[in-house]
Image (spheres, rainbow, N blue to C red):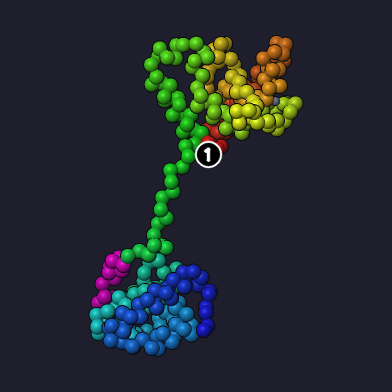
Amino acid sequence: MVRDDRYGELGKRFEQYLLEGIPALKEAGYNPFAFQGMIRASGGVRTAKQLLASAGDTSYGFAKLWEKGKLDASVEFAVCLPWFKELFTDEELERAAFRLTEHRFDLSRIDDVPVPDWHAAPTPAPPAEPTYRQRVEAEEAAQRSRPATTTALTAEAVRSAVFRSLVLERAQGRCENPGCGHPGFHVIGRNGQPVVEVDHVHGLGDGGPDHPANMVVLCPNCHAVKTRAQDAEVARLKALLAGIARQQHETAMAGTSSGR
Ligand SMILES: [Zn+2]
């Protein structure tokens, strides 16, 4: 059997469609012996192309199907199915459609053919994980709608667990201080979480906001330096980390994934 794989998967599907239509041809009182032989010899797509190329005139099979009012079983009809169109040239498609309309076939009947599963639109993807931006905005909205009495408690009480985990995810649990003495520091603690601290660059007690744009992940060493070093060093580090926090936040806001 000569198999022409030039038309790929779609070509195989077209051929399959023609072969599945053979019983309908027989029902229409036409013995498609020659047609089957062509498919065996040349494959479905080339058979269709050969039939379409045959000097303007319609094939014996086509005439037979027309007599029986079964043009929807014709190769021309198969060629016109939208999901097979890319196998054929514009000229071939026009010729197929012309032969059908010339024989008073209503081309809109093509729309009645159920779209095959393999051509149907892919099932919609499951809802995507909310992005960093979506989670930040949801938390901001939730905070706005919370009664003021709750947020008037101590700074300790208003720390958002959502923001904290977003910042940890954003940093992938690693120290965000570019001058870190332990770059890539990554130790998992007893609680299964990385041994790092989520730090508010400008402390809540000093009026710094509890917001990811003011939060960084620091390794224990950097965190100790930031909280316990002399004023000048703390100020230098704060200025540096303020930029990092804002930049990391903006990059994550612009991204499409929450980093999970
Ligand atoms: Zn560090």
Q: Residue at x 50, y 27 (%)?
A: 162
Q: Is residue 218 left or right of residue 144?
A: right
Dot 1, how many residues are within 10 Å of its Cα: few (below 14), some (14-19), or many (20+)? Answer: some
Residue 141 at what x, y percent from top left? 42, 25
Q: Which residues are magenta?
A: 99-113
Q: Residue at x 45, y 77 (%)?
A: 45
Q: Secondary structure at mark 1?
A: loop
Is label 1's Cβ within 8 Å of ligand 1?
A: no
Which quadrant of the figure has residue 220? top right
Residue 200 at what x, y percent from top left? 59, 19
- The answer to whether residue 188 is seen in the rendering is yes
Residue 58 at what x, y percent from top left? 34, 85
Query: Which residue is nearer to you in this view: 76 or 112?
Result: 112
Q: Quadrant of ligand 1?
A: top right
Q: Is residue 42 left or right of residue 146?
A: right
Up the image or down, 69 lies above or below 211; here it is below
How many numbered discs, if any?
A: 1
Residue 103 lies in magenta, yes or no?
A: yes
Up the image or down, 192 lies above or below 127; here it is above
Query: What residue does disc 1 label?
Result: 257
Residue 252 at what x, y percent from top left? 55, 33
Q: Main secondary structure of the magenta part?
A: helix
Q: Is residue 196 left or right of residue 249?
A: right
Query: Which residue is nearer to you in this view: 63 or 188?
Result: 188
